[in-house]
Image: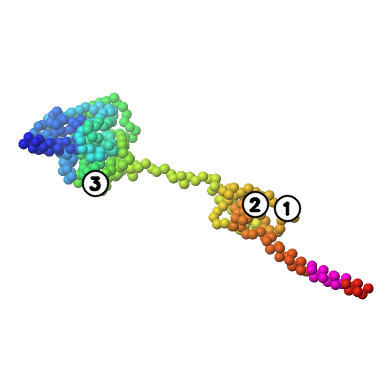
Amino acid sequence: MFFTKTVVALLAAAPALAHMELTYPPPLRSKYNPYHDVATLDYSYTSPLEASGANYPCKGYLGDLSGPGGASVASFAQGGKYNFTVQGTAVHGGGSCQALLSYDGGKSFKVLNTIIGNCPIAGSGNFDFDVPSDAPAGNAVFAWTWFNNLGNREMYMNCASVTITGGSGGSSKRGASWGSRPANFVANVGNGCSTTEGKDLNIPNPGPEVVVNSNNVAPPVGSCEGGPGAAPANGDAAPAAPPAAAAPPAPAAPSAAAPPAAGADGAAASPGAAGPTSAHNLNVQPQPTDSPSDSPAAAPAPSSGSDVPLAGAGSPPPAAAPAPAAPSSSAKSGKKKCARGHKKRRLSSFHH
């Protein structure tokens, strides 16, 4: 019986242990908030916003700001650097988070910091945020939003009542005045915009203070707010140019600048073997020229450095090849002359 009661108690407590929740600054109706009302305490604070968006923003607890449960739980100075704490066990692969600030009771929020990837982390994690030096002083609502990587497409949002005080007067980032900061991103709450499971959301218009912890990112899908994200659009670094794109110039230069040499009569030399060749890539050196008395009549030799292959490598045979036929004809003619001359000598001897 005791075992059964223990199991039932653990199952009842499971929703409170699941997912993640903001613990500092302690949000409205949280058990970590020292001003919470026991009658309205949220025992499943780690649950996401409703898929319909009915309790957006802040889980529908902004009405508490006008009562005791809405008292300020933390003070942050203008220009200061602080951190918020998220706690829980089911991180759903991390995801992307934003730290926000509102001065109109939560009707609208502006982005303080954006974290893409690895937010939140298992256990208890602290995440930095900056209060701009030109953020108005006074009562405000701090909010943490989370778009999980794995699991159902959800949006988590916890909100706390805080106070912004005067600071050191440090300057904000150039071009990032409080009035120019973007509004918070909203998705997965019945607004026609969703996120991709297995990817860290590349939040559009993330603001000037961004930390990118992931290259496994994806933009939102559907009817969503536009604007570039902080991480590469495809989640990967731009690929380096392939080596082939920067081919060495030496082999290409002779081929492009040295057309086939022309013969003595101006005609182009025979192309020889198929494919472009050059004296550069064949390592051909200029050859000595034979003297005119020892060389048969032939086509003029190509000039050094031309693209004409050497003889024997696909070039036509030398023009002197048919020369042996001529001596054969003249030999026969000489034999006949010799016979006639001999006959004449014999007749002359007989006459005498």
Q: Is residue 45 above or below residue 219?
A: above
Q: Earlier along the polypeptide chain: callout 2 or callout 1?
A: 1
> Is 108 in front, or is 49?
49
**Residue drawn at 22 percent across, 48 percent down:** 192
Q: Is residue 96 left or right of residue 331?
A: left
Answer few, some or many: residues within 10 Å of disc 3's Cα (few below 14, many 20 plus, some between 14 and 19).
Answer: some
Q: Residue furthest top?
A: 168
Considering the whole magenta stretch, tell me its main secondary structure: helix
The image position of residue 123, as x and y in percent, is 22, 33
Task: Indicate the secondary structure of the residue bearing disc 2.
Answer: loop
Q: Residue furthest bottom?
A: 351
Q: Would you say the residues marked 2 and 3 are in contact, meaning their CB atoms lie under 8 Å apart?
A: no
Task: Indicate the secondary structure of the residue bearing disc 1.
Answer: loop
Q: Which residues are magenta?
A: 334-345
> Is 202 in front, or is 215?
215
Q: Is residue 81 above or below residue 280?
A: above
Q: Which mark is residue 351?
A: none
Identify the residue under disc 1. 291
The image position of residue 167, as x and y in percent, is 27, 25
Q: Residue furthest left?
A: 1
**Residue drawn at 9 percent across, 32 percent down:** 38
The image position of residue 242, as x and y in percent, is 44, 45
The quadrant of the image that shows the C terminus is bottom right
Asked whether residue 308 appears in the rendered view, the answer is no
Q: Would you say the residues marked 3 and 1 are in contact, meaning their CB atoms lie under 8 Å apart?
A: no
**Which mark lies nearer to you, 2 or 1?**
1
Identified by mark 2, the residue type is Ser
**Residue drawn at 16 percent across, 41 percent down:** 55
Q: Is residue 217 left or right of residue 72?
A: right
Identify the residue under disc 3. 193
